[in-house]
Amino acid sequence: MVSRLRLGVLISGRGSNLAALIEACADPAFPAEIACVLSNRPEARGLDIAREAGLPARAIDHKAHESRESFEAELDRALRAADVGLVCSAGFMRVLTAGFTRAWEGRMINIHPSLLPSFPGLHPQAQALAAGVKVSGCTVHYVTADVDAGPIVAQAAVPVLAGDDEDSLAARILKAEHKLYPRAVRLIADGRVRIEGQVAVVDERE
Ligand code: GRF
């Protein structure tokens, strides 16, 4: 059997995108598998989801470290020990230093609930509502030192409806995220994505 791309999933909380990746990887034909799940918060519900699925899951509590660098060094060791080929940040709420993002450049992606480059950073759904856009969505992008700014792998759009509040828009986007993240991982695992400068060029052929 052809070897599958080994994913290291980074989480901080709920873990619904992790659950979507677990479901995708349960298909033996999916070209990736989850090698480890790491959370910077010991109480993250996503850790239970991972353990229930029988996956190696571990908290690396950033509060137990006196510096970002020592926290990230432990994260890095855990990812390397699990022989991770692609890091998938899925609701991971720590900003990573340039040292870490450089070390994993081209091998680390993130999902963000807006159509980047619109609305990076915190509360993107509230930002979308405040701007009055009629379409929003989600983006999977490579992680670089600049937050929410790396080469875009895949996006999905959803309508912003009159009467939406942050919660209703977030829920609509989240549904799209759960389809988009596995699709983006598949594209990368199938070798259909190459980075050219700021741009990820994607071969979407059937
Ligand atoms: C998602 O909306 C993701 O795009 C953002 O944080 C949220 C995480 O949700 N980065 P979950 O933990 O995957 O349920």
Image (cartoon, rainbow, N blue to C red):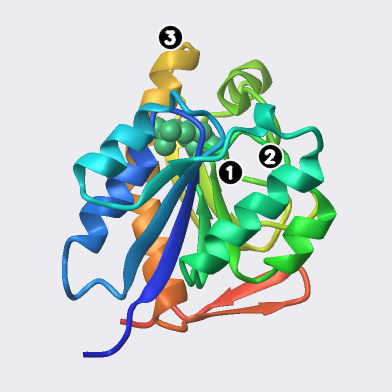
Q: Earlier in the sequence, mark 2 or mark 3?
A: 2
**Amino acid type of the residue tagged 3 in the rendering:** Gly
Query: Alpha carbon of mark 2 to alpha carbon of mark 3: how far?
Result: 21 Å
Query: Alpha carbon of mark 1 to alpha carbon of mark 2: how far?
Result: 6 Å
Inspect this view and state whether residue 132 appears. yes
**Amino acid type of the residue tagged 2 in the rendering:** Ser
The quadrant in which the C terminus is found is bottom left
Q: Residue furthest bottom?
A: 1
Residue displayed at 18% across by 60% down: 26
Query: Alpha carbon of mark 1 to alpha carbon of mark 3: how far?
Result: 20 Å
Residue displayed at 60% across by 18% down: 126
Q: Which SS class for mark 3?
A: loop
Q: Which SS class for mark 1?
A: loop
According to the picture, the residue beneath numbered tag 1 turns out to be 115
The quadrant in which the N terminus is found is bottom left
Residue displayed at 72% across by 34% down: 65
Q: Quadrant of residue 62?
A: top right
Would you say 143 lies left or right of 11 here?
right
Residue displayed at 56% across by 67% down: 80
Q: Are marks 1 and 2 in contact (CB under 8 Å)?
A: yes
**Amino acid type of the residue tagged 1 in the rendering:** Leu
| Total number of numbered discs in the rendering | 3
Q: Position of residue 197 (x, y in %)?
A: 78, 75
According to the picture, the residue beneath numbered tag 2 turns out to be 118
